[in-house]
Amino acid sequence: MVTEKDVEHIAELADIGINSGELVTFTHQFNAILDYFDVLDQVKGDTTVTRDLTNIMREDIVEPSLPRDEVLKNAPAQEDGFIKAPRVM
Amino acid sequence: MEVNELSFEPNDRYNAFLTVCKKAPYGKGKLSGMAIAVKDNISTKGIETTCASKILKGYVPPYDAHVVELLRHAGAAIVGKTNMDEFGMGTTTENSAFGPTLNPCDTGRVPGGSSGGSAAAVAGNMVKMALGTDTGGSIRCPAAFCGIVGLKPTYGRVSRYGLIAYANSLEQIGPMGRTVNDVSTLMQVIAGKDRHDSTTYDRPYSHTPVADVKGLKIGIPEEYFGEGVDPKVAGVVKTAIIRLKELGATTVSCSIPSMKFALAAYYVTCTCEASSNLARFDGVRYGPAADTKKSWHEAYREVRKAGFGPEVRRRIMLGTFALSSGYYGKYYTKAQVARENVKADFARIFSEVDLIAGPTMPTIAFKLKEKSDPLSMYLSDILTVPANLAGIPAISVPCGKVNGMPVGLQIMGRPFEDERVIDAAYAYEQAVK
């Protein structure tokens, strides 16, 4: 059972943004879905699963990459050929 | 190399396309001049690619997905980008930010999803073939609902390079068409190893369909005809299986006990992967501008709240929750164990049978707005998610109608036996033609 406070916290962790009206709906839907997920409690074993996959390594060789203006084309905010991001500090 | 141009102005009554390329360049090759539609989560250089999300409105990829490059090399004309559930999250194509796609068989119904636009473009005769993607049934479901053929290839057979990721460990790009032959032709072009996708195998597909099921043993899982499956749909599929027997196959009943956990394991896995994959949409490198005057988190929250639809936000939050401290063991770890059990069940059954058959979807296409509750929508994926969890090939081929709406026969095979799955579907299709 998750509360509206829990959902608010999850929304914060996920940087998703949520308003109070949505909080009620999301909490209600979350609980229905998580109730359904409870079936997994009956699954036996909890060891980490290993798969028969191996890492694929390659030499670290510089290859041609996209030109800077191509990459910047989709960035909504730019300055002096760089992508502009919100302030961190 | 691309010298010719194909004029393409479809009468799109179904909202199948998000972008139409009125003059589509094409070259020489196996698919020369053939109109192919591409789902809007597959990157196309110079053609807007949105994943049917407001957060990618206006995004024009600077490179082609590997499969798109292969299509262009084969001479195909990429005529447009098709509608879908936002980021592939849905079973009806109603979760598109740009309005739902309608089912060409009955415009009061959904085409299925999430590759609903690709299915409608093919079923509505606007294109001969289309690419879709299948994370938990997103090729097979709309193929079944719209009465066309769709293949989810073996995991690793088709490169995902340039596919905008939703749940990497589950999804595959695959072909959709009106006939098994068309699906096979498109598969010939897109399959094979790609050095940009380290999960691909060197297993190209050069097969031509052979209508032969003689001597094949087909497993019929009881879970595919049990609770939640519309008896009329089950009846039509059983008749189709009898047809396969008449063609020389034998059938044996079997059971997939792990099916009980498959849907929960699927939704935990895909939402966890989505919560990580979709972190990149923050309005910095692409998408609507984040307010750079605001703080990092504040700016991101604004962009993501406005840019993502409710189902996408719901899945990101579910995944974040399932991976959070204190819940990881209860959800994610258990889901991975359940996933291994599904794989083990298939491996056990496939040591005794060559193919597994059942319905693709438990019902016919829903009416528009019929599935308003998320959980009830999730439950309709129960027959398609097992193939994604196990990474095995699975096809949906039309096998009759219920209340005038198409029903899909689903045929699953051993890993890398996509050819056998194609042959069985082809044998059935040719027999009922």
Image (tube, coloured by chain):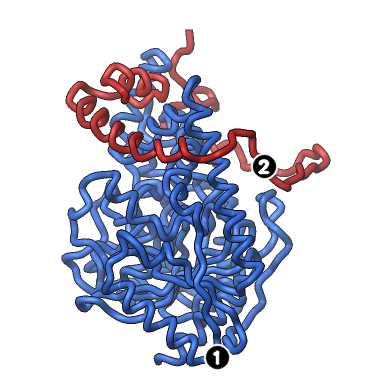
Q: Quadrant of residue B290?
A: top left
Identify which residue, B348 or B23, lies in the foreground.
B348
Identify the residue at the far right of this view.
A59
| Marks 2,1: beta carbons within 8 A | no
Taking B349 as reference, is B92 left or right?
Answer: left
Tag 1 residue: B248
Q: Indicate the quadrant containing the N terminus of chain A: top left, top right, bottom left or bottom right.
A: top left
Q: Chain of mark 2?
A: A
Identify which residue, A80 or B151, lies in the foreground.
B151
Q: Look at label 1 and name its amino acid.
A: Gly
Q: Position of residue A33 (x, y in %)?
A: 33, 38
Tag 2 residue: A65
Identify which residue is drawn at 47% across, 44% down.
Answer: B265
Q: Look at label 2 and name its amino acid.
A: Ser
Q: Chain of mark 1?
A: B
Instruction: Check the image and report above or below for B220 versus A34.
Output: below
Taking B326 as reference, is B316 left or right?
Answer: left
User: Both on one chain, marks 2 and 1?
Assistant: no
User: Taking the image as drawn, is residue B411 in sight?
Assistant: no
Instruction: Check the image and report above or below for B246 versus A3.
Output: below
Disc number placed over residue B264 in the picture, else none = none
Q: Position of residue B345 (x, y in %)?
A: 58, 57
Give the mark toward the camera: 2 or 1.
Answer: 1
- Chain A is which colour? red
Q: Position of residue A41 (x, y in %)?
A: 46, 35
- Chain B is which colour? blue
C-alpha gap between disc 2 and disc 1? 54 Å
